[in-house]
Image (cartoon, grey):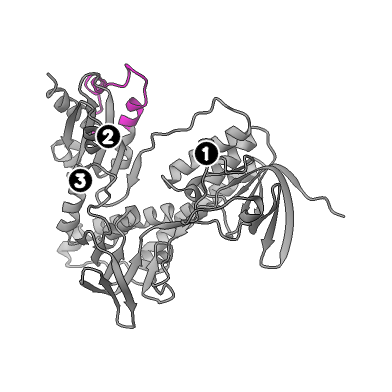
Amino acid sequence: MATTPHFDLIIIGTGPGGEGAAMTAAKNGKSVAAIERYTRVGGGCTHWGTIPSKALRRAIYHMNMVNQSPIYKRMDVVPEYPFGELLATANRVIDEQVDLREGFYDRNRVRLIPGQARFIDAHTIEVETDGTQRRRFTADCFVIATGSRPYRPDDVDFNHPRVFDSDTLLRMDRTPRSITIYGAGVIGCEYASMLRNMQVSVNLVNTRARLLEFLDDEITDALGYHFADTGIRVLNGEEHERVEASKEGVVVSLKSGKKLKSDVFLWANGRTGNTTDLGLETVGITANKRGQLEVNESFQTSQPHIYAVGDVVGFPALASASYDQGRFAASHICGQADYKLVRDIPTGIYTTPEISSLGKTERELTAEKVPYEVGKSTFKTLARAQITGHQVGMLKLIFHRETLALLGIHCFGENAAEIIHIGQAIMSQPAPNNTIRYFVNTTFNYPTMAEAYRVAALDGLGRVF
């Protein structure tokens, strides 16, 4: 009788969380296996989320650059780029990412096992491949890194060819004339921005009172203004009553009495953890109503040897955070008690313009009665922004009025997700090195966007008395 293969650690899922755990454990000498039910590694981040959507955004950006070229305008020619052709760029990037990541597993001798994993008992899983072959594996510890999928309400027909979620939208084979996006979170706002840049008419239905309420008010006000300026119709504080799809289009009836008709419909309101069919009930683990797993500060579930990381545990549901969580969980398994989890994680929102933030907002600090001051730099005053033509945006630094420590960084504009990291490096320093004075005592290359820090710091310090 064949012996059941045994590993120190088995990881379910090969997205950022699973990869982080696998590589860390392998580098610490553990025998590791990773199970992936999809045909290739990378998880939702690589195949349906972060990578394809950002690659698509970049392709749309280049399309607009070409269409705005004076040469084409003089020729009175406007090149057309169908949605499917723009997606081909994303597929090329996906292939490159998969090849790279498969190399990580190969070099670190992590065994990749294809199939659907289910727990048989506390230390045994069964992997089903192609619905027929079943194999069993045992391990001392497990990391569940199965990610999440778009939430699908029962009253919306996702089988209709005009109805999409954020996964299936990337399979759309034509450019729609108009779209109604239900849900104005990060995903909804990003796709609203991208599709509007393709001259698609966009209705963005927001179930909350403001766009992206977790951001600083000034940033969300700026986003709302630029959405309106580009022609995106934003409807705040609305809820759907019915979604009716037909051959002619999709009609969304809102509880307020409004009706919206568009060529296609995108549901972008909420996500669900991928915990069904894992056999969790056999090991005494129960997912919450959103399919997510509850974990402690070490990312252990109710079974101490079974960990969970990434989107399957909920907030913040970012690829960057998932990778860190996977590394942290594996380090905990390996007995590295000194490994510290990164708690201050910047947001990166790829609307047009970009948004990135880290730390406290003015609203939060006011509620906490923290004495703070603000320094700002508008991009239109920076030489680099004038050269590139990307003059929309600002950098906002919030700092303690007495200690001058950075408390929050909020950026809106081209390359905001890159610019944020300069301030992040200072903000993470222990006292007294976390100080806004760093930016006025440092020479920045000229012309650069990094100069915004010096300008914002001088502006803020000018208000201190």
Question: What is the distance, in whole Å, between disc 3 and disc 1 at their CAs?
Answer: 44 Å
Q: From this viewpoint, which residue is outermost toward the top?
A: 432
Question: What is the distance, in whole Å, between disc 3 and disc 2 at their CAs?
Answer: 20 Å
Give the residue type that dot 3 points to: His
Give the magenta part as a residue range. Answer: 422-448
**59 w.r.t. 298: above or below:** below
Does residue 143 appear anywhere in the picture?
A: yes
Closest to the camera, between mark 3 and mark 1, is 1
Question: What is the distance, in whole Å, between disc 2 and disc 1 at their CAs?
Answer: 29 Å
Q: Residues within 10 Å of mark 2 (few under 14, many from 20)?
A: many
> Which residue is painted at 61% across and 57% down in the image?
278
Given contact means CB atoms under 8 Å apart, are the residues at marks 2 and 1 in contact? no
Residue 74 appears left or right of 414: left
- Nearest the eye: 346 or 281: 281
| Residue, disc 2 | 409
Give the residue type that dot 1 points to: Asn
Kindly indicate the quadrant of the structure image that contains residue 142.
top right
Q: Residues within 10 Å of mark 3 (few under 14, many from 20)?
A: some
| Residue, disc 3 | 390
| Residue, disc 1 | 296
